[in-house]
Image: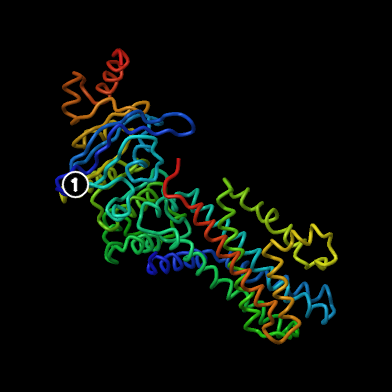
Amino acid sequence: MNPAITLATTRRILAQLKNDHRTLGMLIGVPSLLMILLRYVFDQPQLFDRVGPLLLGLFPFVIMFIVTSVATLRERTGGTLERLMTMPAGKLDLLLGYALAFGLVALVQVAVVLAIALTWLGLDLNGSLGSLVLVAVLDALLGMALGLFASAFARTEFQAVQFMPAFVLPQTLLCGLIVPREDMASWLEATSKVLPLTYAVEGMHEISRRPDFTGTLTVDVVVIAGFTLVALLLGAATLRRRTA
Amino acid sequence: MMSSSPAVDVRDLCVVRGGREVLHRITFDVPRGAVVGLLGPSGCGKTTLMRALVGVQIVDSGTVTVLGDAAGSRGLRHRVGYATQTPAVYADLSVAENLRYFASVLRAPRSDVDRVVDEVGLGKQRDQVVSTLSGGQLNRVNLAVALLGTPELLVLDEPTVGLDPVLREELWELFRALADRGTTLIVSSHVMDEAGRTDRLLLMREGRVLADGAPEALRSRTGADDLEGAFLQLIKEHAGSPA
């Protein structure tokens, strides 16, 4: 591992985004737009106060999953990954470079959505702003790590994009966003316990209701971080120096 | 001892791809400072052999030693430059941004970016985004990345494809200048008229090395007027031999 290579990779990914105005615009604009829609679709401030933070955990996760799975698939199919593997770049340098770059993007994304939600949309948050940003960025990193891992199983960008509904929608259904988890059949509830998005949504739920950093929230943060780490390590295992 | 070892030493290399053996017991070595041409029709195993030299190809059996170390070992990663046939650069970055990134990965000096831009003649396109370049320019960016960090061995897969004769001439002059400074070059091509510019030719066909020698020696040995004829003659001889 080499910090200089990690940072160079981060800079390179950010430069790629900077040159791609449309992607950058969508990364920042789409979650904000969805939040605005949500506020006026509900048209009930109390309901928005409850659901808004949950979606603040979901958007960065979904968006980072798609962006990373396509970006790393491009590196794999475009030959740049192979080229880097013939150079002194370590796998961890690449992974951390991606994590850092997309972590920063997630931070901006969350900051913009939050600013709009707290001012214009009048979101009333019981918990602390800091813990909300922490969980949202962790969710983004989780999405990034899973996207990186998933990209190893896609041959084409068509396939990579379809991993989004395959990986994400079942988790969205089971995470307690639509139906409370305790109302689900026991086998569904059990399944939801091993899916990372459950903890992301639960964490946001805690933040929306309680002002202090609760024990449940601590567990959620640790579990999300753990899932992220495992997904990154699995992702590292899919980066091969030698291929057939 | 280290510096006197050959630049490349391949012994009994066999590679299997997709359940089929594509390289059959390839053996050859390359002295330092030579320009070696790897010639043969498309699909003969040139790219697979080059991938084995840079250590990204899973090898079935045999040994590949590069600059005294096993191909692909950690210590070689900034001593070997590799340019694939399909350009492996970031299409959404400018020429300079691409080169700066790869230079930092190689820990090459910053001045290298200007040097290689100059060497491949992309001064005017320096700040242009790669996706807007022509095919030939794209090829030269790809080559420029391989030149970063002044590697001791350059493995170049069809670097002159799609270039006009003037540029092709310039690149071969560059290759010669690099070799004069002690760099070893292995350059693949399927264009026979480029073969005469090399010190040494490896003619490949169907995963085997048909002939290995100086272009002049190959011509006189086969009695052919040109290398194209020499190649055809060698194929005939090979088909006629019992092994």
Q: Residue drawn 36% across and 61% down?
A: B105
Count how many numbered circles sit on residues in the image. 1
Q: Residue drawn 45% across and 40% down?
A: A244
Determine which residue is flagged by label 1.
Answer: B179
Quadrant location of the N terminus of chain A? bottom left
Picture quarter containing residue B229? Answer: top left
Question: Label 1: few (<14), some or many (≥20) within 10 Å?
Answer: some
Can residue A1 be seen from the camera position used here? yes
Q: Residue drawn 67% across and 83% down?
A: A213
Q: Say what amino acid the circle numbered 1 marks.
A: Ala
Q: Secondary structure at mark 1?
A: helix
* Whole-percent x, y for residue A78 in the image: 48, 49
In the figure, B197 relative to A108: above or below?
Answer: above
Colour mapping: rainbow
Nearest to the observer: residue A233 or residue B95: A233
Left or right of B13 in this view: A52: right
Picture quarter containing residue B59? Answer: top left
Q: Chain of mark 1?
A: B
Nearest to the observer: residue B118 or residue A138: A138
Nearest to the observer: residue B68 or residue B48: B68
